[in-house]
Amino acid sequence: MSSTASSPLLQLEQLTAVRPGPQNRPLTVVESISCTFRHGELTALIGPSGSGKSSLIRLINRLEEPLQGRIMLEGSDIKEMPPPLLRQRIGMMLQKAYLFDGSVLDNLQMPFSYRKRPLPGPDDPDITRCLALARLTPDYLQRDARTLSGGEQQRVNLARALVSKPQVLLLDEPTSALDRPTTDSLGQTLKEVCHSEKLAVIIVTHDLRLTRRISDHLLYLEQGRLVESGSTAELFAQPKSEGLRRFLVELDDEKH
Amino acid sequence: MSDNTLIHLDLLRLVYAYALILLSISLARFRQIGQERQILWASLRMVVQLLAVGYLLQLVFTLRSPLLIIMILLTMTGFSLQIAGSRIKQKMPGFYRIMGSSILIGCGGVTFYFCLLVVGYTPWYDPRYLIPLAGMIIGNSMNSASLAAERLAAEMRERSDELETALCLGANARQASEPILRTAYKTALIPTINSMAATGIVALPGMMTGQILSGTSPMLAVRYQIAILCAITASAAITAFLILLQGYRSYFTAADQLRHPPSSP
């Protein structure tokens, strides 16, 4: 068990990505980033706005294409896999929780319908498992997904992302629209799911308090470059770069 | 044909008719609405354009070359495509290629089925039948085609969050676009469905009225009208379907990625 927990699940190798900038000139958003992610570890991606955090995770489930470099999932290049299959192994929660029209159960069934599998009923272990992981009670299944509160919607979003039993879970600012207590409890749930399911969780966030409470590792990005990485506790205690030091202080000041 | 009921309008009678325009102009002048110039200009355009079309049609009806007649139909289609394209602000990538090929297959296929099997006149390229029938089919299908293209472009942009959510859950481009394609298809066919349901009650269709005026018995004119409405519906449906089928693809890369992802903050 400990050997699988420590072998790299996901490896980014010299990733560079561009997008069309002003006057259609290519703008480098990710610049030769290399790093690894392991089973059961929660990594927070932090950095100023426009530092390439979202772009980086969008490369990992191939919503966007890198200009250079490659991404290896369990030793094979993700470009070799059909994108729909890749995205079942690398789940993602987008910043805006988009829930489809219908009940919570309808939403949880979507990944099955995309795979052309028979739709599981409310008592199916595939459904009850991810519902429990997202800390939702079974009576939610019949509720209209669109009428739920922001926090509940994100939990449905989480449950739905877990339906396909992904190995990696990407989250793009999942708590940006939530209040403090809701953020804390969702964060706690994420941490528990990450450890119990041995998932590699990568979360983009501006919330340093959340980062400190739930993440094991930290990647600090600035202008598309990976400036610093390491264990969260160590980097918070002793940031090595001037950039991270200033970033931690400035955001800390805003809180008070 | 029983042309004994057909009254020939000579030039003098046309002058009487034009007197009605002059009446409208004097009304505008009298009430100081200030619309006289517009009415006059529009009426002159109408006269010149229609006379030109009349001479052109008379010339075309003497043609016996299928190739030339097909060329005329293609030019008509090209012009109407141009007009449709200029009115649509957001065009899907590859707009003219997709619209052109869909209209060619949808309208062309239905027109030939209709002319050969339903009306069944010979020769099949007789311009007296082919040009007006094809014109009605193309004109009405163009309406549905524009609606399909416009709705597709708008929904693809407005619902990009929904599209990406579906992609993230393992949908391929087709599965992710399915709800949008359904909406766009329904929208495209609304005018056709409405005109079928309302015909005969809300308005008497132009072709039927024209046939009756030119001496055709109402029952025969009605049969023609039923047949042409069936053809228009099928052609609109096939054209819209082909546009959406090709159109949604142009929004995705081969790796099931949105070409223009939702703008990140």
Image (cartoon, coloured by chain):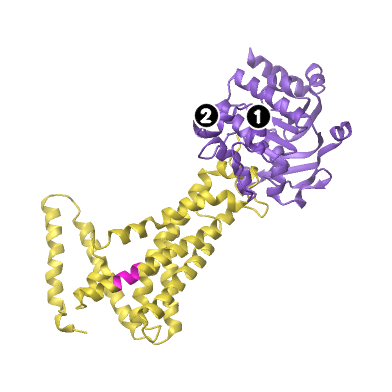
Q: For numbered disc 1, what is the local secondary structure? A: helix
In the rendered image, which quarter is residue B236 located in?
bottom left
The picture's colour for chain B is: yellow
Disc 2 sits on a residue from what chain?
A
Query: Hey, what amino acid is under mark 1?
Result: Ala
The N terminus of chain B is located in which quarter? bottom left
Q: Residue at x 41, y 64 (%)?
A: B141
Answer yes or no: is residue B95 visible. Answer: yes
Closest to the observer, B41 or B94: B94
Q: Amino acid at mark 2?
A: Leu
Residue B7, percent from left and from top: 15, 79
The structure residue drawn at horizontal position 45% and vertical position 59%, both measured from the top left corner, is B85
**Residue A40 occupies which quadrant of the picture?**
top right
Residue A220 visible, this orientation: no
Chain displayed in purple: A
Helix, strand or loop under label 2: loop
- In primary-sequence order, the first of circles 1 and 2 is 1
Q: Is residue B30 magenta?
A: no
Q: How many numbered markers are drawn? A: 2
Q: Position of residue B160 (x, y in %)?
A: 56, 44
In magenta, the rendered stretch is: B224-229
Judged by depth in the image, the label closer to the viewer, 1 or 2, is: 1
Q: Quadrant of residue B208?
A: bottom left
Residue matched to label 1? A132
In space, the residues marked 1 and 2 are separated at their CA atoms by 17 Å
Q: At which x and y percent is residue B47?
A: 24, 69
Residue at point 39%, 60% (across, down): B143
Label of residue B14 in the image:
none
* Closer to the camera in the image, A175 or A251: A175
Tell me, yes or no, whether the two marked residues, 1 and 2, touch with CB atoms within 8 Å. no
Q: Which mark is residue A148?
A: 2
